[in-house]
Image (cartoon, rainbow, N blue to C red):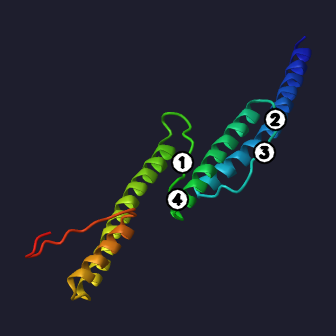
Amino acid sequence: GRTVMVGLLCVTLLLSLGIAWFITRSIAPSLRLIVRRMQDIAKGELRHEVKIDQKDEIGVLAETFREMQNGLRAKVDAAVAIATGDLGQRVAINGRDDQLGNAINQMTVALQTSKAQSDRQDWVKTGKNELNRIIVGQGDLKALATEVLVFFAGYLDAQIGSLYVLSDEGV
């Protein structure tokens, strides 16, 4: 009796160790790969793929990782486009708590507003400088009025314009 019991215990222990070793050998490489790719992302590197196609929890983890990585890549692509001046970019928001996506979209709106203000200021400054150039170079009132009218019509994209000059003889 006792020998059989010890024998069964040893066989069960060896079988359990074999199953544990097999499970560990099948899970560990995939987990190490995912950990390496997470370390890459922590360093800002998004190029490397996770090529795990399993139908278990490790496969679900790998698929979720790929979704996260693709979302980050899309945000990087949008940020690069925005940095080169494409302010029409919008990133997809991955849930209401997507802080990075919301921050990029808010930044884009702020940059669009700032650019629009800067463009308006540049437009006014350019117009003032051009008008000043016209006024300084002209001594004849009629010629000055004509040049100013032509300038404003062109600068404001006006189809027609008129200018009234008040003189001692009237309008």
Picture residue at 64% right of the left edge, 49% below the top = 38
- Position of 41 with respect to 11 (left or right) is left
Q: Position of residue 15 (x, y in %)?
A: 87, 27
**Which residue is tagged 1?**
90
Helix, strand or loop for disc 3? helix
**Which residue is tagged 2?**
54
Considering only order in the chain, which callout, 2 or 3, is on the residue closer to the N terminus?
A: 3
Q: CA distance from mark 4 to mark 3?
A: 39 Å
Q: Nearer the viewer, mark 4 or mark 3?
A: 4
Considering only order in the chain, which callout, 4 or 2, is on the residue closer to the N terminus?
A: 2
Helix, strand or loop for disc 1? loop
Using the image as rendered, state which of residue 140 and residue 37 is in the foreground.
Answer: 140
Q: CA distance from mark 1 to mark 2?
A: 34 Å
Picture residue at 57% right of the left edge, 50% below the top = 75
- Position of 146 with respect to 67 (left or right) is left
Mark 3 residue type: Pro
Picture residue at 51% right of the left edge, 63% below the top = 85
Helix, strand or loop for disc 2? loop
Q: CA distance from mark 1 to mark 3?
A: 37 Å
**Which residue is tagged 3?**
29
Using the image as rendered, state which of residue 62 and residue 133 is in the foreground.
Answer: 133
Which dot marks residue 82?
Answer: 4
* 71 up-or-down from 48: above or below: above
Q: Nearer the viewer, mark 2 or mark 4?
A: 4
Helix, strand or loop for disc 4? helix
- Position of 124 with respect to 106 (left or right) is left
- Position of 158 with respect to 171 (left or right) is right
Q: Nearer the viewer, mark 1 or mark 2?
A: 1
Which part of the image, by quadrant, shows the C terminus?
bottom left
Badges 2 and 4: C-beta atoms under 8 Å apart?
no
Q: Nearer the viewer, mark 3 or mark 2?
A: 2
Q: Position of residue 59 (x, y in %)?
A: 76, 35
